[in-house]
Image: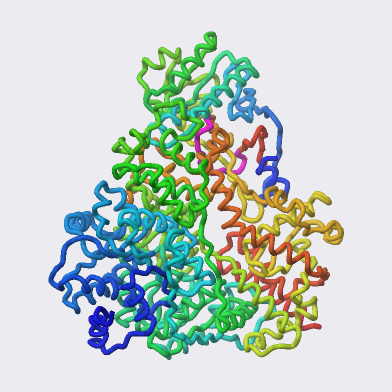
Amino acid sequence: MSCFFTVLRHGYRMNKRLEVTEGNVELEVCGENLILSPQKAVFWKQNQSLWISDLHLGKAGHFRKHGVPIPRAVHHADLTRISQLIQEFAPARILFMGDLFHSEGNEEWQDFVEWRHTYPSLEMLLIEGNHDILERTHYQRAALQVADELAIGPFVFTHEKQFTSGYNISGHVHPCVRMQGLARQGVRLPCFYFSSDHALLPAFGGFTGTHPVKTRKNDRVIGVSDGYLISLMA
Amino acid sequence: MNDKLAPAYYWFASKGWRPFPFQEQAWRAYLDGKSGLLNAPTGSGKTYALWMPCLLEHLACHDIAEVTPGVRVLWVTPLRALAKDIQRAMQEVCDDLQLRWAVGLRTGDTTPSQRQAQKKKAPQALVITPESIHVLMSQSDYPNYFKDLSCVIVDEWHELLGTKRGVATELAISRLKALTDNRLKVWGISATIGNLPQARRVLLGEDLYKKGITLQAQIDKQVEVTSVLPDEVEKFPWTGHLGTRLLPKIMPIIEQSKTTLLFTNTRSQTELWYQAILKFAPDLSGVIAMHHGSMDHDIRGWVEDALHAGKLKLVVCTSSLDLGVDFRPVDTVIQVGGPKGVARFFQRAGRSGHQPGSVSKIYFVPTHSLELVEGAALREAIAEGTFESRKPLEKSLDVLVQYLVTLAVSGGFKPLKILQEIKNTYCYRLLTAEEWRWCLEFITTGGKSLGQYDEFAKVYNDDGVYKIINKRAATRHKLSIGTIVGDPALSVKYLSGGHIGTVEESFISRLSPGDTFWFAGKNLEFVRIKDLTVLVRKSSKKSGLTPQWGGGRLPLSNMLADKIRDKLDRAIKGDYTDVEMQTIKPILDLQRQWSIVPPKDQLLIEKTKTRYGFHLFFYSFEGMFVHEVLGGVVALRISRIQPISFSISMNDYGFELLSDQEIPIEEALEYDLFTEDQLMADIQESINMTEMAKRKFRDVATISGLIFQGYPGKGIRAKHLQASSGILYKVFEEYDQDNLLLRQSMEEVLTLQLEHSRLFEAVRRINQQKIVLKETIKPTPFAFPILVDMFRRQNLTSEQLADRIQKMQMQLEKAAGNQ
């Protein structure tokens, strides 16, 4: 049993109602149907696209290069998780919402390129993030289309949150929500965040941190924990 | 021999002093080439007991004019704040004897130019912190630098024992022994603790401790403990409230004294008391100061100097003034709130009354009236001479990893040789071959899980010598030796410039711009955060929050808990000889009327209902940490009978379960609520062990070099190299389960945080006790202080909090009066 549910069973000291779902949660935003996965990704039904934000591949290698031993398996697991999502939703395209790769090129980029070419018919787009400092040729070889910003239907995708004409979807901040348990225990859960005019996606990568988001009334916050989605109702 | 001692007698005579027997014993033992431990309190002349023979040894076989550079003596001190004073005292003896020895200072504050000078022309003695020894050991010529060393003296060893800095000291000594062909003498100075023989063993090492001796300064220091008694005890006591109300009784004590140190238990308490005293006695402004570890270094230095000079009437302080040379003007010590341990209390008492034969006076100010029991218990423990032990750490692999990389930076090491050395330390005497191999692998290939990758660059095995080649990695390592681990601290500065001190990130993150808070005795308005700096401006508002610094709360020691149970037990039998017990008799009487006062062989559980819900109170008197875990286990076990959720509160005397539905305690007791069966499994399930281990892992990861905290003072962090210990923990947990640093964190949670041996002892004791369940109409006097703890966590301002508690207190007092 995960530690999180130990806390949950004793009850939260929160004035919010929790709804725990095992597996996906469907959500309507701007009249579009979104499926949130506890794998920290979103599938947009109408557009047949899979949204993945802040993968930070290559971060482990970057750390190793500087003498901090982080196993490469972290990123293999990330790619395997995307493969599973591809199997589950059979998307026509994947939108990487920035910070796909953490540093200059290293062997882990090669791992990604190899993985990418196992899905030749799948369209992949990268909204460039602040960590994406690779040369354009790298992206070309990986058959990745690159853009700063992308507008499809009611949505405008950017890496960092921006005020846009459409409903803004971004990553970058690695949003999380803090839940207070008993006896001074608390957990931070990565979360999806939907407000009236913008949404934040959780960081997908296994080697990423989180940053708490401030929530306001009527915001929808959906935390992620071990295969479960926890919706907080204000 | 007496010839050799002559200069010492001459020097003492020139000061008009006579050496104490223990000082003479120390001189002789040292000149005999012995190592050992000196048990002497602060202010007893311990410095001269061990510094003098270092000089005598030199004078015995050298002409007084014959002085060559080279370090002979390392004087290790746990606090850099102390170093300056000790260095001054040591230098003074040299100068008086006209010996041209230089006593250098080497701490984190030593400037680069001073360091260069020390490198070029080594002083004969260095006053140094454990970290700085390791920094010196990261320089390539260190074997040469230390080859003339004849002695390492570790001051305030009790402070280092049981900490990772103590382990670092053990490692440094093991290396220095080898560098000097084991001619090195090792001495420690320790205040009284319960395990002095073990303290000696840890310091001297497995190869030396049997030959070492222990010397005791037979200075019978008389300590007089006086509790400050309230005129009228409130039958429903609550923490933090009574203290400042006793100010009218405390002020005369301060006025009659020359200089008073007022100790509080936490930094935030220090802030609150400073405010309260200034408000009560505004004429003290100018002669009152405060001192705590988060304040700016220079301000603290100023306070210390003013103390020496006798310019201050009162200093409100925390443990930051526990150690150090004497502040001679200090003649009175006041302790606010239970000190939670006998040794600490005794040491604080010793900060007053330095003149030989004079009495150290300490006043105990309870923060709630029940705490008076602690006053009585403390007095008795001191009279009997029972003190807590400090348990040394074992197998701290993070410190070992850091040490190995340090040696790799300075020219490399041969594993077999270093292994032999460290097997002679107490900490690593039981290190297994497998653990050793893991450490070597960790620094060379990064561990098994990434062994096949060549990108990892740290330590190379260069034909049997382990070395660092990567320059940047070496620099980063040097900078991270001795970084102080803790919640990321942000420095607090005025908008107009001027550093005030540091606060923890977790406190600031709760503030919004415009909020005000008390810090270093000033009311500050939070403006914004910029580059790890909190910018503030002065505020004229009268109210504000007080920062809570981490690590503030200490649990009641085992020893003291036992004494408290004893005191209550005797009160039940009618023994009210202590004035403290006499004072709280009305509370005990009411407690007995509404419930019982539990004797030693009973565990009292009270059940009651208020408008907040259904309460259970357990009085096991085991200290906060044990109660935190025990509360979790009991809650879990009850919830197995029926689904129920609780909130848990605790203090040092007991814990409370609160629920919105009736708690089936009778049934739970029938099912053997406190069984030892499955206890460990239930602990793991009830508390978030992983979360706790993650927190411990922050220290472990920083020490072992997994996290680079950045360049000291500059707030610059390595770009793209930030990862919190939480993420690292998660990654290792998932992909590198054999990582021994993870195991160490879990181990530290069990032994240090949960005090699991103490927890098991507590459960065993409970199982021998008779359990008494009392249903009470209202919360009893014992229950009240735990009950109100609930409000404390609701983020109320102190005024709102006081208001709410007082209302409740009045209702209960009324109920008691009506009976």
Q: Quadrant of residue A83?
A: top right
Residue nearest the observer in this picture, B710 or A97: B710
Q: Which residues are magenta?
A: A205-219
Q: Is residue B514 visible?
A: no
Q: Quadrant of residue A5?
A: top right
Who's the residue at 85% across and 56% down the image? B671
Quarter of the rendering occupied by the C terminus of chain B: bottom right
Q: Residue lying farthest left?
A: B65
Residue nearest the observer in this picture, B31 or B76: B31
Q: Is residue B534 above or below residue B776?
A: above
Who's the residue at 31% across and 82% down the image? B311
Q: Is residue A85 above or below residue B422?
A: above
Q: Residue lying farthest top?
A: A121
Residue nearest the observer in this picture, B136 or A147: B136
B281 sits to left or right of A91: left
Q: Main secondary structure of the magenta part?
A: loop
Quarter of the rendering occupied by the N terminus of chain B: bottom left
Reply yes or no: does residue A213 show up in magenta.
yes
Who's the residue at 17% across and 55% down the image? B120
Residue A111 horizontal/vertical position (percent): 47, 19
Residue nearest the observer in this picture, B210 or A97: B210
Reply yes or no: does residue A230 show up in magenta.
no
Q: Is residue B795 above or below residue B696?
A: below
